[in-house]
Image (tube, rainbow, N blue to C red):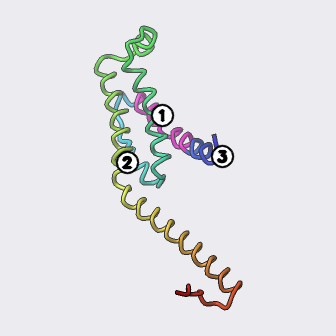
Amino acid sequence: MSKIQEAMKNKAQEAMGEIEHQVDLFFDNNYKTKFSMLKYLEQLKYKRKIVNLMRAELDYPLEEVLSDDEQLIEGYSFMTAKQKQKYIEFLQKMQADCDKYIDKHAAEWLQDSRRRRNQKAMRKRHAERLAEIESGTGYKRRKKR
């Protein structure tokens, strides 16, 4: 894993700490919450890859609660069927909010990416032109026919 990937994963894990806190509050408040994942992501202003990592982190508890494994069923037996359904809906809503955030900002990120590519190409052309000027007369040589 590269340093960039590791940094992205750490940033996602840091943000997931608040989400885990909200899940705990969800349990403590009788399976009710006013937490909005979309608003939380808007505050963080994370990019797509980090939000995708966060969304993937939500897959694990959702898979656990929906699992047919006897040990996991026993582990979630403290919840009534209605509470379990509310928990599943809460996790699914957080995932849907991640998707909404990505869809909402996709055009902005694409435009930003294009702008950065254009700037990089312009810097490269500028460096090539400077090298050409320094090595010659400053004018492009025309091919003779």
| Mark 1 residue type | Glu
| Mark 3 residue type | Lys
Q: Secondary structure at mark 3?
A: helix
Badge 2: residue crowd in 10 Å (few <14, some 14–19, many ≥20):
some
Asked whether disc 1 touches disc 2, contact meaning CB atoms under 8 Å apart, the reply is no
Q: Residue at x 70, y 85 (%)?
A: 134
Mark positioned earlier in the residue sequence (3 or 1): 3
Q: Which residue is mark 3?
A: 3
Q: Which residue range is magenta in the image?
A: 12-28
Q: Secondary structure at mark 2?
A: helix
In this picture, residue 133 sits left or right of residue 31: right
Asked whether disc 3 touches disc 2, contact meaning CB atoms under 8 Å apart, the reply is no
| Mark 2 residue type | Leu
Q: Residue at x 38, y 42 (%)?
A: 35
User: What is the number of the mark on residue 38?
Assistant: 2
In this picture, residue 113 sits left or right of residue 124: left
Give the distance between the C-alpha atoms of the residues marked 3 and 1, in whole angstroms.
Answer: 20 Å
Give the distance between the C-alpha atoms of the residues marked 1 and 2, in whole angstroms.
Answer: 16 Å
Give the distance between the C-alpha atoms of the residues marked 3 and 2, in whole angstroms.
Answer: 28 Å
Would you say residue 22 sits in the magenta stretch?
Answer: yes
Residue located farthest toward the right when viewing the structure as drawn: 135
Q: Which residue is mark 1?
A: 57
Q: How far from the left and from the top, in percent, is residue 10? A: 60, 42
- Magenta stretch: helix, strand or loop mostly: helix
Give the quarter of the image for residue 69: top left
Residue nearest the observer in this picture, 102 or 137 = 137
Which is more foreground, mark 1 or mark 2? 1
